[in-house]
Image: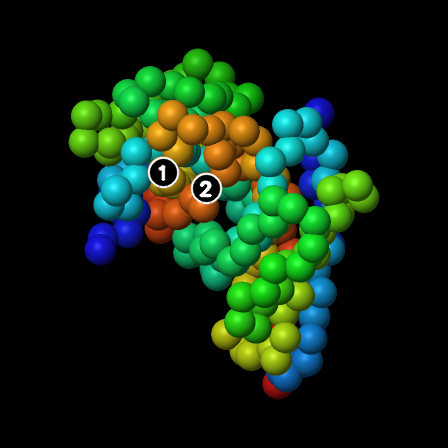
């Protein structure tokens, strides 16, 4: 089967750094994606890792270790607007995404 | 550049009824995927359409069917609605073409379906 594990909740303060981990078990792995979703909104693409290593996009970075079936999303200089749900998702060759259950990030002042 | 659009935004149906949801992909995209997202859960893959054919399918019963039109827009049909079908239905578009890849998928705002 295919499954992804990520923490259900994370709390941090403005200006801090937070890391959201994701471990996965899947076949036909083609890459690990991260999506942000605000309450009732559309998931928004944040980052994608196909190869091992770190990808940086502004305040967000994502890391992948294929040998460990592990990745993380790093959010720096947290802002109140970063409060949202964050999903890791594994893609297969055909573009099918399998999502984790999501991590609810609460940013406190 | 219009993003992914979905209609309607909200819908209320009763058990046993049928529903059709619509999706227009982002300009230039040729592939549409549908996801079901229950409250507090991650999106679950229903199926994907490319070149007007179902290309991949998730673990959903045959009550869930779809269609893709020549202009790449798509419909999701659900027959014999159950209470458990209440969810946010998301459409995502991407450019896969004939080269399979995990190109970025762009999601629409979703249709909130409530089954009473």
On the image, the x and y values in percent for residue B95 come to 36, 38
Residue, disc 2: B103
From this view, report whether residue B10 is shown above or below residue A1. Answer: below
Say whether marks 1 and 2 touch (CB < 8 Å).
yes
Q: Give the quadrant of the C terminus of chain B.
A: top left
From this view, report whether residue B49 is shown above or below residue B89. Answer: above
Residue, disc 1: B95
Locate residue A20 relative to residue B43 in the image: left or right: right
Q: Is residue B17 visible?
A: no
SS under mark 1: loop
Q: Give the quadrant of the N terminus of chain B.
A: bottom left
The quarter of the displayed image where residue B70 is located: top left
Discs 1 and 2 lie in a common subunit: yes
SS under mark 2: loop
From this view, report whether residue B11 is shown above or below residue B70. Answer: below
Residue ranking furthest to the left: B71
Of all chains, the one bearing label 1 is B
On the image, the x and y values in percent for residue A46 come to 51, 58
Q: Which residue is drawn at the image coordinates 64% and 33% (left, top)?
A: A29
């Amino acid at each position: 089967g295919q499954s992804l594990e990520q923490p259900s909740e994370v709390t941090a303060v403005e200006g801090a750094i937070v890391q959201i981990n994701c471990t996965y078990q899947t076949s036909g792995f083609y890459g690990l994606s991260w999506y942000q979703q605000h309450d009732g909104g559309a998931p928004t693409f944040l980052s994608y890792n196909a190869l091992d290593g770190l990808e940086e996009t502004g305040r967000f970075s994502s890391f992948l270790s294929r040998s460990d079936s592990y990745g993380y999303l790093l959010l720096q200089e947290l802002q109140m607007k970063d409060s949202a749900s964050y999903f890791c998702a594994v893609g297969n060759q055909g573009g099918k995404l399998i999502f984790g259950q999501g991590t609810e990030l609460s940013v406190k002042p | 550049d219009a993003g992914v659009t979905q209609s309607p935004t909200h819908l209320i149906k009763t058990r046993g009824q049928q529903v059709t949801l619509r999706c227009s992909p982002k300009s230039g995209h040729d592939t549409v995927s549908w996801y079901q997202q229950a409250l507090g859960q991650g999106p679950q893959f229903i199926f994907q359409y490319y070149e007007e054919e179902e290309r991949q399918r998730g673990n959903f019963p045959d009550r869930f069917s779809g269609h893709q039109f020549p202009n790449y827009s798509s419909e999701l049909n659900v027959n014999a609605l159950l209470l458990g079908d209440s969810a946010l239905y998301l459409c995502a578009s991407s450019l896969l073409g004939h080269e399979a890849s995990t190109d970025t998928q762009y999601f629409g705002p979703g249709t909130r379906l409530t089954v009473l």
